[in-house]
Image (cartoon, rainbow, N blue to C red):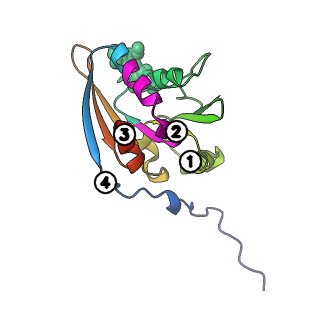
Amino acid sequence: MRPSPQPLEQPLAVDAFAPGHAPILETRHLRWPDESACAAFAAALARKPGLHDAFIELRGPLGAGKTAFARHLLRALGVTGRIKSPSYALLEPYGVGDLAISHLDFYRFDDAREWVDAGLRDVFAAPGLKIVEWPEKAADLLPAPDLRLTLAVDDDGTRRVRVDALSARGRALLA
Ligand SMILES: Nc1ncnc2c1ncn2[C@@H]1O[C@H](COP(=O)(O)OP(=O)(O)O)[C@@H](O)[C@H]1O
Ligand SMILES: [Mg+2]
């Protein structure tokens, strides 16, 4: 008797990444009246040694300033040249010295299979900084972040930012 064929649609083995509901260990509330305040926070964060293997989630509506923050962080880390929004490519990789940085945007992501095809699991299995916009669109596929920034825009354009630390590394980044 021949063995029954493997089902075409294997369930995705994503258990290792199941984030559950990681507890928030610490929260900060920031106010960025303009983009230079965002740049200053990014520059301070870039100086923290723990950042090099961190996973940072960026939440908030379209236009909140997620990509702007990612750009300031990448620049502060020494990325030169054009920094594209990864909203079409899903992933824009950078290298600075031996630091690998992955900037991801899941806004247009709607298929878990796409995650595997794009090799995105490898990104999270490897060392390096991960910056992720729209993590909620890939919620069950992502590990728990170290830091979660949730941005909101006031009527006058001021950004209000809630920063949650969800790991010891995240707490160290806020110290
Ligand atoms: N802190 C800020 N203060 C003022 N303007 C900002 C700030 N952050 C972003 N912006 C501006 O808001 C616009 C949208 O930002 P963007 O980063 O593309 O948003 P998102 O990635 O959240 O959709 C850009 O023109 C950007 O320059
Ligand atoms: Mg964006």
Is residue 56 part of the magenta span, yes or no? yes
Determine if the C-beta at disc 2 is less than 8 A from ligand 2. Answer: no
Q: CA distance from mark 3 to mark 1?
A: 16 Å
Split into 4 quadrants, where in the image is the C terminus? top left
- Label 2 with label 1: CB-CB less than 8 Å: yes
Using residue 23 as the reference point, say whether residue 16 is left or right of it.
Answer: right
Q: Please give the name of the residue rendered at 35% of the width and 54% of the height, measured from the top-left corner.
A: 22
- Label 4 with label 2: CB-CB less than 8 Å: no
Q: Please give the name of the residue rendered at 26% of the width and 41% of the height, measured from the top-left corner.
A: 27
Residue underneath mark 1 = 124
Graded by Cα atoms within 10 Å as few (under 14), some (14 to 19) or many (20 or more), the crowding at tag 4 reads few
Quadrant in the picture for residue 62: top left
| Region in magenta | 39-57
Q: CA distance from mark 2 to mark 3?
A: 12 Å
Residue underneath mark 2 = 130
SS at mark 1?
A: helix
Say which label, 3 or 1, has the lower sequence index: 1
Q: Amino acid at mark 1?
A: Phe
Residue closest to the eye, 18 or 70: 70
Split into 4 quadrants, where in the image is the N terminus? bottom right
Residue underneath mark 4 = 23
Q: Amino acid at mark 2?
A: Lys
SS at mark 2?
A: strand
Using residue 93 as the reference point, say whether residue 174 is left or right of it.
Answer: left
Can you give x and y, in whole percent of width and height, for residue 153 in the image? 27, 22
Quadrant in the picture for residue 2: bottom right
Residue underneath mark 3 = 148
Say which label, 4 or 2, has the lower sequence index: 4
Q: Amino acid at mark 4?
A: Pro
